[in-house]
Image (cartoon, helix red, strand yellow):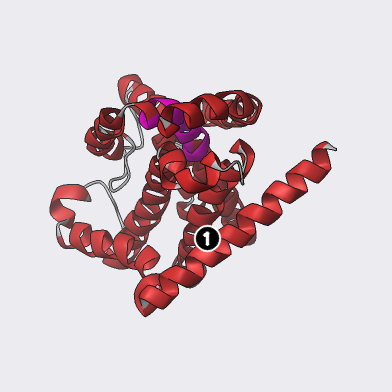
Amino acid sequence: MFLRRAARSIEVAAMLVRRELVADFEVSRMSLLWPIGYPLAYTLLVVFMRPVFGGGFIGSHAEFGMYVFVGFCIWHSWFEVLRRQMDAVKANKSLVTRAEIGSSTLFLITLFYTGAQLVLRLVFATLFAVFLLKSGAWAIIGFVAFALVALLNGAVIGALLQPFSTLSPDFGKGIQSISLGLLITGAVFFRLPAEQPPTLVAIVGINPMGALLNLARAPLFGEAPVAPLASYVWIAVTFLLLAVVLLLGRRVMPILIERIGN
């Protein structure tokens, strides 16, 4: 019974995401390039300002650009899936109020849509890593696996914040206001020193995006993760929170539907 419901949720979510992606493409033929264009634009800006952001990075401009590009790809996907999960009920109000989709399907819709964008980014990043950094197979596998875990982490955190965002419009604005702080403390576009002060490690470790981002990026550049213990703790917490989201979602969804329907 559980497997049947899970398969049905995956099927419905995949169908709705496919429909949304096709609609995006019909509106703009450039929609396939935007997931690459956003991090690429930031990468070019940061590379241009390398004396400010990349003082601790030893390597060519291309390698530094690769470092920044990977960071922005994971960062933007993490924050985008978090934001979309927070707004998922309001964005799909017509479907949830008619009880056409359940909480698990709603969760998967956002995860699959943002995941499709991340996969495109990972393909480009992997090609660059193979030809530019000469990264090995295990480094690529580790990079892709941890990047997907980072995406899942953003999704479950967004789903947990979803009730607050749905009932309070100002809550989402508050999360948006701290995005820059998460970006900086996550060491997205600069390399931390080899001998990291404990305070710096703690700051990166507290930020789930920063910990998982640096864990994913480290294999490509042959360096040790910034906060390995915190990173693996966040992986365990991510899957624990996933179970909580799936269990509580069925109870919370009727309450949200009642509130937004009034």
Q: Quadrant of residue 259?
A: top left
Give the x, y percent position of residue 117.
Answer: 47, 60
- The type of residue carrying mark 1 is Ala
At 57% across and 31% down in the image, what residue appears?
Answer: 238
Q: Nearer the viewer, residue 84 or 185?
A: 84
Give the x, y percent position of residue 187.
Answer: 32, 40
Q: Is residue 37 left or right of residue 261?
A: left
Q: Is residue 52 left or right of residue 212?
A: left
At 49% across and 50% down in the image, what residue appears?
Answer: 222
At 63% across and 58% down in the image, what residue appears?
Answer: 14
Task: Pick the quarter of the image with the C terminus.
Answer: top left
Q: Is residue 61 above or below residue 217?
A: below
Q: Is residue 150 above or below residue 43?
A: above
Q: Main secondary structure of the magenta part?
A: helix
Q: Secondary structure at mark 1?
A: helix
Q: Is residue 207 above or below residue 97?
A: above
Task: Pick the quarter of the image with the N terminus.
Answer: top right
Q: Is residue 191 left or right of residue 231?
A: left
Q: Is residue 164 magenta?
A: yes
Q: Is residue 32 magenta?
A: no
At 31% across and 20% down in the image, what residue appears?
Answer: 199
Give the x, y percent position of residue 101.
Answer: 61, 45
Q: Quadrant of residue 181?
A: top left
The magenta span reads 154-166
For disc 1, the marked residue is 116
